[in-house]
Amino acid sequence: ATLLAMDAQSQEILRKKLEELEFKEKCSKAFKAADADGNGKLDLNELEHVSLGLFDIPDRLKDVVKEHDLFKQAFVEKDVNKDKFIDEDEFVEVMKWIVVKAASEASEVESEQITQSMSQTNVA
C-alpha cells in the first residue's frame, strides 16, 4: 500500500503531527542520544542507531524501517549539504521522511494504526 492508500483524514493527521513542536522535541532528544561522538552531526552508523521508541511508531513499522534500509535511504536523500553527515535540522526532515515512508511501505491497516498511535500521544 502507498501513502495514497491512506484516507485524506489520516494523511492530514500524520502531516500535522510531523509539524508539531512535540515531534521536533522528540527529534532533538533522539538526535542527541544518537550523536555518540558529540560532534553535533550524525554519520550513517549513528543514524542507523536512532531509537525509534521515542516516536510512538508501532513495532511492525520499526521492522519496515529496518527491512527497507530506510535510514540509509534517508541519509542519502536528506543530506542537503552533501557533507556525508546529518545535522540536527536535516535530522527532523529525516524523521519526517522515515515516518511517512514506513507508513507507505506498510499495509493500509498499519498506516491507520500509526496515525491513530501518533494522534493519541500524550504531552508529558
Image (cartoon, rainbow, N blue to C red):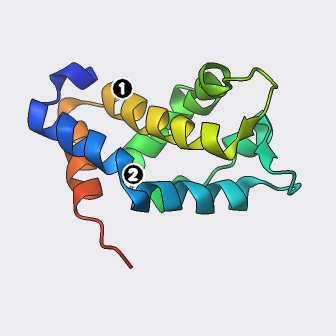
Q: What amino acid does circle 1 point to?
A: Glu
Q: Position of residue 45 (x, y in %)?
A: 78, 39
Q: CA distance from mark 2 to mark 1?
A: 13 Å
Q: Position of residue 58 (x, y in %)?
A: 36, 51
**Residue 73 position by quadrant:** top right
Q: Are marks 2 and 1 in contact (CB under 8 Å)?
A: no
- What residue did someone put label 1 on? 105
Residue 33 left/right relative to 117:
right
Question: Is residue 113 or residue 77 the one in the foreground?
Answer: 77
Q: Above or below — where is 84 with respect to 65? A: above
Residue 35 left/right relative to 108:
right
Q: What numbered label is drawn on residue 57?
A: 2
The tag earlier along the polypeptide, 2 or 1, is: 2
Residue 49 left/right relative to 40:
left
Report the quarter where the N terminus lies: top left
Residue 53, visible in the rendered structure: no
Residue 64 left/right relative to 4:
right
Q: What amino acid does circle 2 point to?
A: Ile
In the rendered image, the residue lying farthest to the bottom is 124
SS state under label 2: loop
SS state under label 1: helix
Q: How many other residues sit within 10 Å of disc 2, few (<14), some (14-19) or many (≥20)?
A: some
Q: Position of residue 87 (x, y in %)?
A: 72, 41
Q: Residue at x 59, y 27 (%)?
A: 74
Q: Position of residue 42 (x, y in %)?
A: 77, 42
